[in-house]
Structure formats: C-alpha cells, structure tokens
DNA sequence: GTTTGTGAACAGTTTCACAGCT
DNA sequence: AGCTGTGAAACTGTTCACAAAC
C-alpha cells in the first residue's frame, strides 16, 4: 500500500496479485464453513490452517483487499465472507453454458458447487441431435444450432467446454463470436482466443503427468546414491510400504517413444 | 543420470523448476502431434506456438533438461518426445485407482488420454454396494472394502479421488495408509496428508470463481457506466451487505454434492 | 497479552538480448 | 544466414520479523 496513512483506502481491487486471486476462493470456502457453524471471528492462523496455507501469506493476501481485521482479535467471519464474495464478483449471478454433454459434461451439470455460489447453469449444449431434449441434471439438452441464440438471450459471458479435443477450438470460436469472454476448457487442447477473452484450462492428463514426475523422483531417491545409478527408475518400488514381494507393476517394457 | 559426453556442470535433473515441470506435458502433447504427422524437426518458435507459450520460455525450460537442440536447425521431434517422456516418468506404466464412481469418476474412467500416456486404470472403487460389479469403462466397479488389497496387489502409487467432499479426507487417509504417495483430488476440500505425499487438486468452482473475478473487472472497465447496461450479462441479482448478525449463508458449498 | 498489517529480505519465474554453434 | 542456450535484468510471489493496534 501507499506510504500515506489514509482513513479509508479508496481504491479497492486495484491490482490484486493473480496468486492472491487464485486463493480467495479457498478462503471463501473455509469461511463459509465457519459461518455455517456460526463462528463469529477467526484468527489468521486458524483460517490459514483451514485453507491449507500459512498465516503470513493469508494476511498478506487480505492486505490487498483492505484492512478487514482487528488486531488482537482476528477477522469477522461474516464480514470477510461478504468482502471476498464481492471482490470475486459473486454477489451477482453468473449464467454459464456447458458445451459437450458427455460423461464429463453431465458430471459438471450435476455438480452442486456450481449452482450454490453465484453460478447458474443457463443451458446444456451438445452437437448430437439424439441428445436434444433429453434431460440432464433437470435441464433439457439443447442442440448446438441454438448456441448463439442461447448465449445472446441469456446474456451469458462464461462458457465451459467439455467436448472432445477435436471439437474444442471450433466450439470456442463460436462461443467467442457469440459474446463469451471467459472460458473454462476441459478439452486437452490449447485454445487460441482473441485478446480480452480469458481461458482457464483443467487438464487431467497434465496433472497426472506432474504427479508422475514427482513420484518417479521419490522412487529414485531411495536410501542413498548406491542403487540409484545403475538401477533406473523402472519399477514402482514403494519406499515405505512393506515390499510385499512387489506388485506386478514392472511391466518391463521400456519402449522409447510414446504410443499414439 | 549421465548426460554429457562433454564436461558438463553435472547439474542434470537436479532441481527442475516446478513451473517448468508443469509445462513439460504441454510440450509433450504438441510434440506427439508433430510426431504423428512425421515432422522430423521443429524450432523453438514453432513448438512454442503450438504449446501456447513464448519461445524464450520454452528454450529456458529445455535448457534445464539438457542441450537437446541443434543451433541453426531446431529440435529433433522423436528425440525430444523420448527425453521429455523419460523426464516425466512416462516410460514406465503407472497403475492408477479411481475412487468414487459417480458421474465424474465415470467420466475420468472413460477419458482416453488416461490410458494413452503411461497411465493405466488399475481399478474403479466405490462405496455403494449397489455399484459393485457393474462395469464402467470396461472395468467392474470394486467395493471400498477391497481398497487396501487392490492397492497392494497392483503396486499402485497414484490415486484419484472423485468422491463427494464429505468422504474425501477419509478416503485419502485410507489411500495413504495403503501406500499411495500421489493423489489427484477432485473433491472440493483441502486434504491433509503426511510429508512425502503429493496432492494436486482440480477444483471446478475455484476456476469459475477466478474467471468471475476477471469477468467482473472487464465489465467495470467499460468506457463509462452508460454502455454497460444493455450488453452486460445477467443483471446483478443481489448486492446488499449482510448485517453482522444476519443470516446470509443459505449455502451448501461444502455439503457433498458432487457426482451422484 | 494477542494478533494484524506490512516493509524488507528472499526465492522463484519470466523476459531480454546476445554470444556461440551449425 | 538461422537458431539454440544462457547469463543478466526485470518481475512476481513468499517468508520473515516486528511495530502498531487492540
């Protein structure tokens, strides 16, 4: 903050760090749980523990929003819930469309956390004519032909893509042309969008690969440098768990290039 | 791992930055696509474009793996595919269990990218006895009672949690006790695990909230308050602050409502 | 006494720009 | 000529530690 000591810092939401924004939903969830238990106040230490971060980070994060705590006491739960909700734009209702109603799309449509906080599923859209009209999560699936009119009629600005990878860019282009400016992409593809459109991606296989990287490293680290050199990290050698004769994990094959 | 034929600083594989690790799967995907089209070499500029990053970042990332390019030419596609696969630990097969076979769990089980890149679904596990034996994605669903034996018998070290939030920590504890050391969590909860266990989370509602934050900011930026009227998404529904003692928590955020 | 809010130190990441190899 | 690999600079994010406020 500025060095000057003002009574009420005027400019809210001026440049909140991206890393902080990404944690606000976490704090909000923890605070909501406290609110439901009618806990009136909470310290940075307690709240940080509930959100899975450390307290210094949490206090720093909150300092970007303003001075909402009381020294020697902590933070007022209800007040913070409101302030964070407002900062995140959750005091208004965001209509959302989900495109691609396969297993994943259906799972998303049924996901409760969706509707419970600021978001409302305005429509489910699929390219398969056989799906049209079928109810999923209480809503009739609409055909892709209607995509543009649905978005315009409902003033939708957030779209979720849950189609196969091959269809994602095309769907994305249509969404953007129809006025969508924020996209959550579940298809394993890089989407290209014009400036001003935000894309966030959720990618299962990327997450698994990151886990595999660390997992591999754990296996190679086993007790000293002795075995590490010659024995390449091939088998899922458990570090702690009783060896149990090893699983039948070692499929042995080490084909160089990845299959298709 | 021996790298240099020439005298190298010997700092191979020691401490690849986390940010780089997170991008390797992206590069791998782009490279695999090139490989399928039999493209022999690629420049940092081209590959960066395909992966959606800039070329300086890509070159820096690759420099942590070693000098796998040729100046004036670019990178050999097949060779890079292999090197990155190996770095990520994908030259071995990782058995994975999915716990919680609702809509989401089923979607994950059916997800093709799963099997195609080093991961193999070893078992699907659900707590509902009615699910037991039912085939999902070609595999019979197993009951939670078998969780420990499945993990031990198959040498599984990676687990995916797709249960309702309320069950996640309990499932997590059992997975860890049975020897799992990497967890991909889709339940909207903070999991606590002992040291040495990696957790990555995928959280739909967090992603949406981050999008909403930026979306809200876009709306406010529009040249004056006048223009914002007609074109803006769903009219703000609620906007008043809650009183301290008031109840403004009709939420059900945490209450387990994920798959069905 | 307790706990917030925050400058300052530190750590990690991205971008720049160019030397060095082909 | 073209392109990689990498120090150095710039930027972003995290942690420390303590004065100020209750």
Image: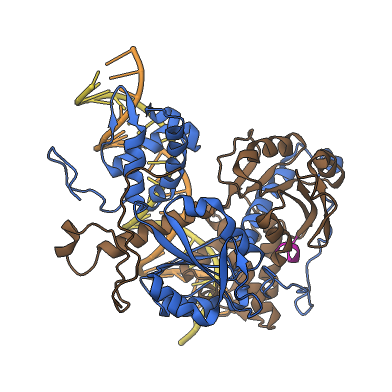
Chain colours: A brown, B blue, C yellow, D orange
Q: Main secondary structure of the magenta part?
A: helix
Is B218 left or right of A215, judged from the image as shown? right
Q: Is residue B211 above or below residue B231?
A: below
Could you say which quadrant of the image residue B157 lies in?
bottom left
* Residue A244, position as x, y percentages in the image: 30, 78
Q: Residue at x 29, y 64 (%)?
A: A219
Q: Residue at x 32, y 47 (%)?
A: A255
Could you say which quadrant of the image residue B208 lies in?
bottom right
Q: Is residue B47 magenta?
A: no
Q: Is residue A211 above or below residue B165?
A: above
For the magenta stretch, what is the residue range? A114-118
Is A183 left or right of B65, judged from the image as shown? right
Number of marks drawn: 0
* Residue A56, position as x, y percentages in the image: 46, 68
Is A73 left or right of A147, judged from the image as shown? left
Q: Is residue A202 above or below residue B195?
A: above
User: Foreground: A222 or A16?
Assistant: A222
Is A113 left or right of A74, judged from the image as shown? right
Q: Residue at x 23, y 67 (%)?
A: A222
User: Foreground: B227 or B17?
Assistant: B17
Q: Is residue A115 magenta?
A: yes
Q: Residue at x 41, y 78 (%)?
A: B178
* Residue A154, position as x, y percentages in the image: 85, 47
Residue B135 in view, yes or no: yes
Q: Which quadrant of the rendered structure holds the N terminus of chain A?
A: bottom right
Q: Residue furthest left?
A: B7
* Residue A234, position as x, y percentages in the image: 28, 59
Residue A71 in view, yes or no: no
């Amino acid at each position: 903050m500025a060095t000057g000591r003002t009574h009420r810092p005027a400019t809210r939401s001026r440049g909140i760090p991206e890393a902080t924004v990404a944690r606000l939903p976490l704090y909000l969830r923890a605070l909501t749980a406290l609110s439901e238990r009618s806990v009136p106040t909470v310290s940075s230490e307690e709240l940080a523990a509930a959100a899975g971060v450390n307290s210094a980070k949490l206090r720093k994060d909150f300092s970007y929003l303003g001075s909402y705590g009381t020294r020697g006491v902590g933070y007022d739960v209800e007040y913070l819930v409101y302030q964070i909700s407002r900062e995140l734009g959750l005091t208004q209702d965001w209509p959302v469309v989900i495109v691609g109603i396969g297993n994943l799309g259906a799972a998303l449509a049924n996901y409760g956390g969706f509707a419970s906080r600021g978001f409302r599923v305005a429509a489910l859209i699929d390219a398969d004519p056989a799906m049209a009209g079928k109810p999923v999560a209480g809503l009739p699936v609409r055909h892709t032909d209607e995509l543009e009119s649905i978005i315009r009629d409902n003033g939708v600005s957030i779209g979720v893509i849950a189609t196969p990878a091959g269809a994602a860019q095309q769907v994305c282009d249509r969404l953007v042309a129809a006025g969508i400016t924020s996209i959550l992409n579940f298809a394993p593809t890089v989407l290209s969008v014009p400036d001003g459109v935000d894309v966030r991606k959720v990618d299962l296989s990327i997450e698994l690969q990151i886990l595999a990287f660390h997992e591999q490293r754990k296996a190679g680290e086993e007790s000293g440098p002795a075995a590490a050199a010659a024995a390449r990290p091939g088998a899922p050698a458990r570090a702690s768990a009783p060896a149990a004769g090893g699983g039948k994990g070692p499929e042995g094959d080490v084909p160089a290039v990845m299959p298709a």
